[in-house]
Amino acid sequence: MSRLLILSGKGGTGKTTVAAAFVELARAAAYADCDVDAPNLHLVTPTTADPERFEYVDLPRAWIDPTVCVGCGACAYECRYDAVLHEHGTYRIDQRVCEGCALCAVICPVEAIALQPVTAGDVIVHHPGRRVFSTGELRMGHGSSGKLVAEVKSRLPDAAPDEGVVVLDGPPGIGCPVMASLTGVDAVLVVAESSRSGLHDLDRVLDAVAGSGARVAVAVNRAGLDEGHDALVQARCEARGVPVIGTIPGDPTVVRVTDEGRTLATAPGPAADAVRALYTATVAMLQPRSTESVVTPSSRQENQP
Amino acid sequence: MKVAVLSGKGGAGKTFVAVNLAAVTRGAAYLDCDVEEPNGHLFLRPTLAGSRDVFEVVPRIDDDACTGCRVCVDFCRFNALAAVGARVLVFEDLCHSCGGCHVLCPEHAVIPTLRRVGRVRWGAADDVAFASGALVPGAMSASPVVHAVLERGQFADDAWTFMDCAPGTACTVMDVVADADVCLVVAEPTLFGAHDFAMVADLIRVLGKPAGIVVNKWTGGETAVDRLAAAHQLPVLARIPYDADLHRLIAAGRVASQESEPHRQRFESLAAGLSTLAAEAVPA
């Protein structure tokens, strides 16, 4: 069994479109949506009406008992997150800002501070047929999406090595949720966009995955939008030693098919043809081989002006 | 007046809208708060006036002073400290920089040290004031970098500041929205776009901020986004039709309102709509 993670850096480049088509083409026995901030994979892949739900409980957050607090302000003085609010002479914790370190509770001279459990999200596990689809939803304003991603992945079965591809739809960006998604994956397919923003963000996501040990390949989506950037994306990948294994042209069919809740797996049109070819190339990449592609770290860490 | 430009779904057109609004508004500022993938500079191409690294504080253990008492190890809720024999090891990736180990160590053996997590840059593009944050790829917390951008972007109350957010509704987006006077949600009228717009609409309701909607890549008619906006009583301030030429301009990193008169008018009218929304929202 190989675990394939689809990433993009930039949002909206087509991660979920590619992941959903791969789920169908691979008849994946297990798949997951690691974009817990804005999950979409369930809109276009098989689900069940009564999935299992598990609350994701984060570290408990501080709470000041106003009947015990003597207003000394020690908690506010030490809190590194500025989570202690001082209003109208009383202290209270902004639980949205609190990270649950418990320093305030430890140093409070009158033991006025308790730690209260919080539910920061939900893990939702569907069992369509004999398959497993694990997805998660971060509750609004919570910051620990990396840990929720780990929870979502933990619900996937540890299947035997010969059970094909496990498809993981990743989050955008290059931060904590992406790093949590990367743990334990065999290969990463980066869906890049042929644009000035797409090129910039591709570079950053390749920096983030360098050193993960996973094989990395790139597919270029919306190719042909800007021919200059088609060539620049190709050249950048070549310079960094990352193979470009697919090119998906802009195609209005994609939105139409997706809006019907379907994937590109069996759809008509040039984009669907390209995604099917990309799937074949990805399966070939997942085969064991002697020479591994290694991402060269960028010469520039952040290529801002 | 501070405007948080947000979207649930990535790629809906936040940066496109924020950059163009800043370009058509006299004396405006643009803040790139999408520190994981900041793109505003690729369009505005600012002349930088300065930059600085953003750090987090992580512990270093002075092995000579440490007696192995384990006070820090037992305190740390993030499992960033571990006792191995009489020594304490630090796992920086797990540290949340709460400072508790430093405060509580009876031997003063925990030395705060800096870990670089990003960089904030500032300058100007023509008369648009500019600030942008960039997270180090793989760094665990974007919050310090977002806050560094917000600190850099404190201008006079009558100046328009457009704050380009990260996608989603996580805590860094909440921090920017909390700092804003008005929200502008850019939504794509697709199945994914409508689903993610609903999440953002909930966030706006909870935070109680006035908000307007831009339907981007509009292909005509009343869309799922329009229906959701109506259900949430949020006004649609603009519909930007899908246009292959416009998308070519964006792909090439051009500011559309500086390239074509119809686009300039479209964003001027959106800015006027925001003005009205903000004026109505300000308590008398």
Image (cartoon, grey):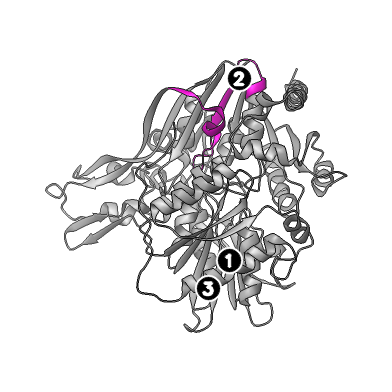
Residue that badge 2 annotates: B28
Residue that badge 3 annotates: A283
Q: Are marks 2 and 1 in contact (CB under 8 Å)?
A: no
Tell me residue A245's x, y (percent).
52, 62
**Which corner quadrant of the image does residue B57 belong to?**
top left
Packing grade of label 3 (10 A; few <14, some 14-19, many >=20) is some
Q: Chain of mark 2?
A: B
| Drawn side of residue B202 relative to residue A124, left or right | right
Residue A82 or residue A47, whichever sits in front: A47
Q: Are marks 3 and 2 in contact (CB under 8 Å)?
A: no
Residue B36 within the segment the image draws in magenta: yes
Residue A288 or residue A166, whichever sits in front: A288
**Which corner quadrant of the image does residue B233 belong to?**
top right
Q: Which mark is residue A278?
A: 1
Asked if labels 3 and 2 share a chain, the reply is: no
Asked if labels 3 and 1 share a chain, the reply is: yes
Tell me residue B12's x, y (percent).
67, 44
- Report the residue at 73% width, 31% height from top: B210
Packing grade of label 1 (10 A; few <14, some 14-19, many >=20) is many
SS type, badge 1: helix
Residue B266 or residue A220, whichever sits in front: A220
| Drawn side of residue B219 relative to residue A19, left or right | right
Packing grade of label 2 (10 A; few <14, some 14-19, many >=20) is many
What's the amino acid at mark 3? Answer: Val
SS type, badge 3: helix
What's the amino acid at mark 1? Answer: Leu
Q: Is residue A137 something that shows in the picture?
A: no
> What range of the chain is rendered magenta?
B23-48
